[in-house]
Image (cartoon, rainbow, N blue to C red):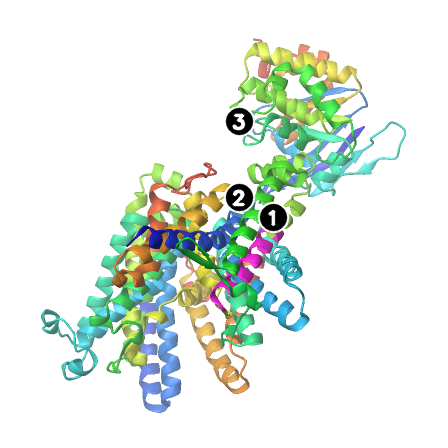
């Protein structure tokens, strides 16, 4: 579905990503793990079009069997339109907009009649959002904001959902709710690419994973294999 | 100093304030979305005034159509200015945009001097607009009433647009977080362009009103309403549209009352009073009356 | 070598400007002399504004206001006593006793401007970026209103005229040397490095022990001192002062020089001041002969916007170019 081919990314004069290769298959959940500053967020921003690679291609195949398109030169809104939705780091809800307006912004590129119905299904998924639909999103708790951010990303009916650190700063119970919801979303046919510092959760959720270190792919493989890799256990899973 | 005199001053203040508010809205909207103090905004008022003159005298359009054409002309000017100068600077330090807007302001004024000459021109609306109405002890011209009502209608329309429409929601989302707005599929270039267009269109209408009220226009006329509307926007809280409206009326009233109620020798200190207020507000109340804490300004 | 370089440069600058002033005073006509003096005054203005805006990253538009303060103080201190009854019939008696020759009057004017900057600094230096710019712009307008209204000593909007034409290329060259030398010394001192640090990252600078407020105040005050001097020189060059001259347009002209030359580059400011003064003077006869008023300003504004788009740090950035520094950078 998504093949990142050999990309280099610079931020200002700093060379942040070096020859990154990633592959995301249809229906998979892929995790991207690594320490702070390894280049995880930069990778996601590049896929979403907020940053431009200085080298390499990002090939995207919306449906299996179709010809891939290179999205590395497309504008973010075109990429969203093609079916890739990113739930940004720190959730990024629009604090001054109401819960419902946030969801409407998520459906910005749609003009069909189903929008209202999809808002209702987000409310079914997370009833608290329905109860607070006219309140400013800034008044929600961290966990509720995460639910809103996730619901908002789903409003664009993505084929590929990208999440940047969904567990950041949340209570364990809420993280579990969110991850369970991701599992369910995936089972409905949405491919997921997730960046996490919480490697235990990420490897548990995902099918395959990539480990980034200082802007390079250090390791990759089946998540279950990586979870039992002693090196990974030592560095990322806290197993001595 | 009887109550009739004060009522008259209040009416004058409201009329002046409604013009400040229209210009201040544009300042605030543009600041809110791209964090730019657009100093050239005041000169759009001048362009609006000259466009009015052109559409009335040269083309000979009826009045409501003139207003529409002036609005559209100034929308266009706003779009061009954003596209050719502010968009290439997006992402640069805020001061860069501000200096550029000073440059654009000077350019527009001097293009005005070059093509239209610096001589003031008379600006007169059809005679019936000058008819004086009396309401108790308060009197005003029809033009004053038209100015006030048009301003109110435009403000209500704008507030509804920003509150209810898809474009309005996108504008507010972009103002809050430009990167996340892009991740939601919002074409921020379009949203920013729309903001400049609407803000400039309103300033153009204010130019029409300014000319109608004071009867004379010249290429440097935008300077004073521009600066004062900026002060109004700061009073209300830059970035907030209701704040800009409130600030406009407060400044209009305060200015008229300052001149009308204090002994005449103070009236020549009017501008010092306005800008003194600006500095004091920037220091003690940097978010204005209704502004949200967008970032630290002090 | 490195240590001696500024001293060499200073000597070269003094000698060449003295020779230049001597030659031009004796050979050129009044028109050329006036242009040379304007150029020098603009150098003083641009370099001193660069100290405030370029080094510290403050964005003050208040230079014309400081010029006005310096200019009016100098003019009143040197105003010929025999003209006072005619021009300033209501001049307060107690001020009459203060009368100074040109040089001390200039110094007092500069100090007056610096003192006003100190007062202004206390109130507005907490503001940042374009908010400071707007506040200092308000300050220009306030000063204009005050000058217009204090008509017993300033003649209000009519302006003070009939000043003695003290300013000549010697005075101007002298002040160019002093301004450039002092700003250069400041830039390459530890104080200058604190200033640049404040500009680049004020939180980090503060954490390293740089006092933000006093560094900024210092930059504003020193800049204002030279602006005051420039105001005095300017008044006694055109022999008249009107409140309207010290406008936002004047501020804009100085800012164009600083921004185009490079915010932080003294060489850049000097060159930009020379080029811009000469350009504007070239346009003036064109404008008058063909009735195309405003072309000079349009060209300058256009140039400014282009520089901001394509080279926002200005032609020289913060650097001093190699031909000034030699191979040894301090």
Secondary structure at badge 3 equals helix
Q: Nearer the viewer, residue C161 or B76?
A: B76
Q: Quadrant of the N terminus of chain A?
A: top right
| Count of residue discs | 3
Residue B194, compared with residue C141, is above or below; it is above
Q: Contact, CB < 8 Å: mark 2 with mark 3?
A: no
- For marks 1 and 2 on the same chain, the one whose residue lies earlier in the sequence: 2
| Residue B18 visible, this orientation | yes
Q: Which residue is mark 3?
A: A138
Instruction: Please provide the residue range marked out in magenta.
Output: B197-215
Q: Which residue is mark 2?
A: B32
Q: Contact, CB < 8 Å: mark 1 with mark 2?
A: yes
Indicate whether residue B200 is drawn in magenta.
yes
Image quadrant assignment for residue B12: bottom left
How far apart are labels 1 and 2 at the CA level?
10 Å
Residue C43, compared with residue B233, is above or below; it is below
Alpha-carbon neighbours of circle 1 within 10 Å: few (<14), some, or many (≥20)? Answer: many
Q: Name the chain under label 1.
A: B
What secondary structure characterizes most of the magenta part? helix
Write the residue at 44% across / 48% down.
B249
Q: Which residue is mark 1?
A: B195
Which x, y percent locates residue A36? 56, 26
Write the residue at 36% across / 88% down.
C30
How far apart are labels 2 and 3 at the CA level?
18 Å
Alpha-carbon neighbours of circle 2 within 10 Å: few (<14), some, or many (≥20)? Answer: many
Secondary structure at badge 1 equals helix
Q: Quadrant of the C terminus of chain A?
A: top right
Image quadrant assignment for residue C20: bottom left
Which x, y percent locates residue B211? 52, 65
Residue C170, compared with residue C263, is above or below; it is below
How far apart are labels 3 and 1 at the CA level?
24 Å
């Amino acid at each position: 579905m998504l093949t990142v081919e050999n990309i280099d990314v610079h931020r200002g004069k700093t060379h942040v990503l070096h020859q990154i290769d990633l592959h995301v298959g249809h229906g998979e959940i892929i995790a991207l793990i690594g320490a702070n500053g390894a280049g995880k967020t930069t990778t996601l921003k590049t896929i979403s079009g907020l940053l431009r690679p200085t080298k390499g291609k990002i090939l995207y195949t919306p449906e299996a069997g179709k010809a891939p398109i290179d999205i590395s030169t497309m504008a973010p809104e075109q990429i969203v339109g093609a079916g890739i939705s990113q739930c940004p780091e720190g959730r990024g809800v629009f604090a001054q907009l109401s819960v419902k307006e946030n969801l409407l912004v998520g459906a910005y590129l749609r003009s069909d009649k189903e929008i209202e119905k999809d808002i209702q299904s987000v409310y079914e998924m997370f009833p608290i959002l329905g109860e607070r639909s006219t309140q400013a999103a800034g008044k929600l708790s961290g966990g509720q904001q995460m639910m809103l951010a996730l619901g908002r990303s789903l409003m664009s009916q993505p084929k590929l959902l990208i999440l940047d650190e969904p567990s950041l700063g949340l209570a364990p119970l809420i993280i579990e709710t969110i991850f369970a919801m991701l599992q369910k979303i995936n089972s409905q046919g949405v491919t997921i690419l997730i960046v996490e510092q919480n490697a235990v959760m990420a490897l548990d959720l995902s099918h395959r994973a990539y480990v980034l270190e200082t802007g390079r792919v250090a390791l990759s493989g089946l998540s279950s294999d990586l979870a039992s890799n002693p090196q990974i256990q030592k560095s990322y899973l806290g197993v001595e | 100093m009887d109550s009739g005199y004060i009522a008259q001053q209040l009416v004058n203040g409201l009329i002046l304030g409604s013009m400040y508010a229209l210009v201040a809205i544009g300042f605030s909207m543009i600041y809110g979305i791209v964090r730019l103090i657009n100093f050239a905004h005041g000169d759009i008022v001048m362009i609006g005034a000259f466009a009015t003159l052109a559409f009335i005298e040269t083309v000979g359009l009826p009045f409501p159509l003139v207003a529409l054409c002036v609005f559209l002309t100034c929308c266009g000017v706003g779009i061009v200015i954003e596209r050719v100068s502010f968009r290439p600077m997006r992402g640069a330090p805020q001061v860069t945009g501000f200096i550029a807007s000073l440059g654009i302001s000077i350019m527009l004024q001097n293009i005005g001097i070059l093509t239209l000459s610096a001589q003031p021109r008379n600006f007169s609306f059809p005679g019936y607009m000058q008819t004086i109405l009396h309401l108790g002890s308060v009197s005003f011209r029809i033009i004053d009433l038209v100015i006030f009502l048009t301003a109110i209608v435009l403000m209500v329309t704008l507030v509804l647009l920003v509150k209810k429409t898809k474009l309005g929601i996108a504008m507010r989302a972009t103002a809050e977080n430009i990167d996340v707005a892009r991740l939601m599929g919002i074409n921020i270039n379009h949203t920013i362009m729309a903001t400049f267009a609407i803000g400039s269109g309103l300033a153009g209408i204010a130019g029409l009103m300014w000319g109608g009220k004071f009867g004379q226009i010249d290429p440097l006329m935008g300077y004073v309403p521009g600066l004062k509307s900026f002060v109004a926007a700061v009073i209300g809280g830059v970035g907030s549209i209701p704040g800009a409206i409130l600030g406009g009326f407060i400044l209009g009233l305060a200015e008229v009352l300052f001149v009308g109620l204090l002994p005449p020798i103070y009236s020549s200190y009017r501008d010092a009073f306005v800008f003194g207020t600006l500095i004091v507000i920037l220091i003690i109340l940097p978010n204005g009356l209704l502004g949200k804490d967008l970032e630290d300004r002090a | 070598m490195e240590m001696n370089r500024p001293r060499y440069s200073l000597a070269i600058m003094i000698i060449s400007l003295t020779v230049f002033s001597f030659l031009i005073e004796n050979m050129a006509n009044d028109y050329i002399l006036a242009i040379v003096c304007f150029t020098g005054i603009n150098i003083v203005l641009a370099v001193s504004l660069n100290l405030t805006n370029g080094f510290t990253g403050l964005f003050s538009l208040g230079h014309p206001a400081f010029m006005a303060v310096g200019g009016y103080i100098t003019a009143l201190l040197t105003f010929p006593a025999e003209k006072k009854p005619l021009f300033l019939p209501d001049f307060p008696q107690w001020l009459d006793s203060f009368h100074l020759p040109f040089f001390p009057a200039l110094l007092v004017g500069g100090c007056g401007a610096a003192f006003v900057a100190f007062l202004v600094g206390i109130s507005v230096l907490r503001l940042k970026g374009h908010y400071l710019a707007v506040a200092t712009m308000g300050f220009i307008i306030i000063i204009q209103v005050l000058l217009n209204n204090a008509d017993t000593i300033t003649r209000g909007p009519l302006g003070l005229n009939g000043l003695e034409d003290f300013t000549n290329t010697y005075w101007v060259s002298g002040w160019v040397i002093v301004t450039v030398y002092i700003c250069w010394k400041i830039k390459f001192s530890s104080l200058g490095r604190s200033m640049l640090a404040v500009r680049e990252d004020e939180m980090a600078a503060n954490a390293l022990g740089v006092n933000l407020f006093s560094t900024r105040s210092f930059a504003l005050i020193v800049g204002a001192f030279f602006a005051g001097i420039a105001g005095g020189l300017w008044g006694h060059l055109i022999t008249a002062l009107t409140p309207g001259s010290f406008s936002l347009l004047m501020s804009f002209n100085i800012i164009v020089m600083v921004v185009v030359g490079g915010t932080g580059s003294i060489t850049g400011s000097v060159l930009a001041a020379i080029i811009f003064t000469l350009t504007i003077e070239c346009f003036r006869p064109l404008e008058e002969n063909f009735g195309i008023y405003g072309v000079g300003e349009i060209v300058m504004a256009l140039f400014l916007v282009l520089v901001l788009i394509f080279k926002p740090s200005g032609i020289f950035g913060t650097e001093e170019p190699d031909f000034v520094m030699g191979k040894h950078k301090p």
